[in-house]
C-alpha cells in the first residue's frame, strides 16, 4: 500500500544482487494511486485524481531500467475531482516533446493568466522502453504507433486545456533528466 493505492509486484527475479552487474525482472501493477499524494513528493507540480496502470516485462541491469512496457492513466471510475496546476502542465508538456516554455507563455497570456489550475478528464502515458528509446503514446490513443501525435492530457470544462505529444521516440536518458 502506497500513495493511497496499491503497487503489486509479481514474477520478481533478482540475479546476482551483490555483484557488480545485478539484474532484476518483474511485473508491477498500480491500482488507485492518489495523484495529490504522489505529485506532492515529486517536483512536477500539483495534480489531483487517481491513476492506475502497470510496468510489465521490467528488466533492470545494474539497477537501471533497460526494458519495460509501462502505462499510467486516469482511474476512470474514481469520483475524485481532477485538477492540474500550471507547473504540472509544463512538466507534462516537456515529456511529450512540446516546448514547456511555450506552454507557460500561452498560459500567462489573455484570460488564461487568471487560472492557477485546470480541470481535466483524462491523463495518460504509455512508454515501451527498448534500446534506450521510449516509444510513447498517450491518454486517448494508447495504441498509436510511435512518431504520431498523441494526447497526454484531455482537459474538461472551460477553459479547456489539452496537451498533445509529438515526440513518439524519446531517448530514455534524456527523458529521465
Image (cartoon, helix red, strand yellow):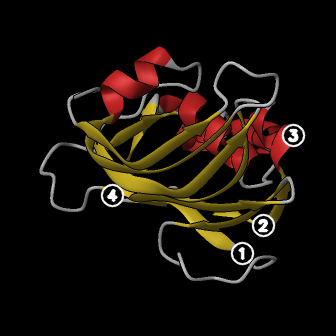
Judge depth for marks 4 and 1 and give the one in front: 1
Q: Do the residues bearing badges 1 and 2 touch, measured as CB atoms within 8 Å?
A: yes
Q: Residue at x 49, y 49 (%)?
A: 26
Asked if residue 31 is positioned above or below residue 73 in the image, the reply reads: above
* Front in this rendered view, residue 89 or 136: 136
> Which residue is label 4 attached to?
157
Judge depth for marks 2 and 3 and give the one in front: 3
Mark 1 burial class by Cα count in 10 Å: few <14, some 14-19, many 20+ = some
* Front in this rendered view, residue 26 or 85: 26
> Which residue is label 2 attached to?
166
What is the number of the mark on residue 149? 1
What's the distance in space between the residues labelled 4 and 3, CA to CA?
A: 33 Å
Mark 4 element type: loop
> Which residue is label 3 attached to?
174
Q: Do the residues bearing badges 4 and 1 touch, measured as CB atoms within 8 Å?
A: no
Tally the marks.
Answer: 4
Judge depth for marks 4 and 3 and give the one in front: 3
Asked if residue 128 is positioned above or below residue 105 in the image, the reply reads: below
Q: Earlier in the sequence, mark 4 or mark 3?
A: 4
**Spot occupied by residue 156 in the image (x, y as percentages of width and height):** 35, 59
**Spot occupied by residue 22 in the image (x, y as percentages of width and height):** 71, 31
* Front in this rendered view, residue 4 or 118: 4
Q: Is residue 14 left or right of residue 47?
A: right
What's the distance in space between the residues labelled 1 and 2, CA to CA?
A: 5 Å
What's the distance in space between the residues labelled 2 and 3, CA to CA?
A: 16 Å
Name the quadrant of the N terminus: top left
Judge depth for marks 1 and 3 and give the one in front: 3
Q: Is residue 73 left or right of residue 162?
A: left
Q: Do the residues bearing badges 4 and 2 touch, measured as CB atoms within 8 Å?
A: no
What's the distance in space between the residues labelled 4 and 2, CA to CA?
A: 24 Å
Amino acid at each position: 500500500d502506497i500513495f493511497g493505492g496499491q503497487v503489486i509486484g509479481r514474477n520478481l527475479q533478482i540475479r546476482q544482487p551483490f555483484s557488480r552487474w545485478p539484474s532484476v525482472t518483474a511485473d508491477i501493477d498500480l491500482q488507485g494511486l492518489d495523484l495529490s499524494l504522489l505529485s506532492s513528493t515529486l517536483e512536477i507540480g500539483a495534480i489531483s485524481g487517481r491513476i492506475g496502470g502497470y510496468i510489465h516485462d521490467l528488466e533492470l541491469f545494474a539497477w537501471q531500467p533497460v526494458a519495460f512496457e509501462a502505462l499510467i492513466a486516469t482511474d476512470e471510475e474514481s469520483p475524485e475531482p481532477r485538477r492540474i496546476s500550471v507547473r504540472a502542465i509544463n512538466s507534462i508538456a516537456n515529456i511529450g516533446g512540446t516546448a514547456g516554455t511555450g506552454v507557460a507563455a500561452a498560459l500567462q497570456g489573455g484570460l488564461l493568466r487568471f487560472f492557477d489550475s485546470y480541470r481535466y478528464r483524462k491523463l495518460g502515458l504509455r512508454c515501451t522502453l527498448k534500446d534506450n528509446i521510449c516509444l510513447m503514446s498517450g491518454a486517448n490513443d494508447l495504441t498509436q504507433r510511435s512518431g504520431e501525435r498523441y494526447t497526454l492530457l484531455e482537459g474538461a470544462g472551460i477553459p479547456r486545456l489539452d496537451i498533445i505529444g509529438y515526440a513518439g521516440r524519446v531517448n530514455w536518458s534524456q527523458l529521465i533528466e
